[in-house]
Image: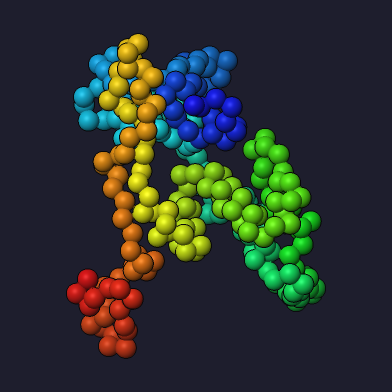
Amino acid sequence: EYAWREPRFYASVSFNGCVWSLLKNAETTDYKNDVEKQVNYYYGINSDGFSGTGVYLRSGIGIMKYVHPDDTNRKEIKAKAEPAIRFAEILLIYAEALNELEDGSSYNIPSWDGSTSYTVKRDIDEMKKGIRDVRRRAGVPDYTMTEYQDRDVFRTKLKHERQIEFMAEGQRYFDLRRWKDAEVEESKKNYGCNFYMSDTEEQREQFYTPIEIADLPTAFSRKLYFWPISHDELKRNKRLTQNPGWTYND
């Protein structure tokens, strides 16, 4: 099930049987001493997964994306950069914006200092600039010309690209609302691996049978596109009105 995925999967996802890089010597940063450990998430006392303690992956899938080898064998987590915005976000949002322009339309956008202007239109060569660098860094091929030419196909591909590239970065929540896809995507049931299965010959393969994750119920109504305005704020300003779908007592 986890074979032949793209490189970002193995760099970002902790799955049953995945390999973690560990720093063997916690007192040094000599990476020649790195070791690798295969981790399994079957049920059982001797398992790395659900052992009856209540601490386990509810879906059988975890996140490896933010973990540095130092983190796994030290008392303190290694400090990491926390960018306000990633360059990949700038590139992908640029390609998305160009795709939504009407065919044949063109706009002149002045530069920040007014010294020049830029012509903006649905230009496939420009859209490639927003896609190729992201996918090339990830080690995956560019989209085909057919996918670039069809606006709806490109939109679908780009949505999937953002879901992969920004996994666990807090972008998905806002993307689904910006696209008005939340009422569909967030109403779907969440499924994961059957983490109740142990590492025995009889149950090992059943671990991969998808089961609904009871701890992650899903529900969405259209009013959830907006948050409710606090009752205290409404009382302070009589000209404020509550957001659609919410009552003045919410």
| Residue drawn at the location 35% of the way across and 11% of the way down | 201
Q: Is residue 92 visible?
A: no
Q: Which of 130 and 194 is in front in this view?
A: 194
The total of numbered circles placed on residues is: 0
- Res. 220 visible in picture: yes
**Image coords of residue 155 (percent x, y):** 61, 57
Q: Left or right of 27: which side holds 90? A: right
Up/down of 134 relative to 228, above or below: above
- The single residue placed furthest to the top in the displayed view is 201
Q: Left of 239 or right of it: where is 72?
A: right
**Image point (49%, 44%), residue name:** 167
Measured from the top left, where is residue 108 in percent x and y?
A: 76, 75
**Which colour assignment does the render follow?**
rainbow
Whether residue 249 is situated above or below residue 225 in the rendered picture = below
Q: Locate the C terminus and report the quarter of the image it occupies.
A: bottom left
Vertical order, 209 against 149 (above or below)? above
The residue lying furthest to the bottom in this view is: 239
Q: Between residue 28 and residue 64, name the one nearer to us.
A: 64
Q: Residue 82: horizontal and vertical position, in percent?
A: 50, 47
* Residue drawn at x 64%, y 38% as measured from the top left: 138
Would residue 99 be found to the left or right of residue 58 on screen? right
Q: In which quarter of the image is residue 112?
A: bottom right
Side of 208 relative to 120 (left or right) = left
Q: Is the residue 13 above or below the residue 201 in the image? A: below
Q: Position of residue 176 (x, y in %)?
A: 47, 58
Residue at 23% x, 82% y is 235
Which of the 4 image quadrants contains residue 195? top left
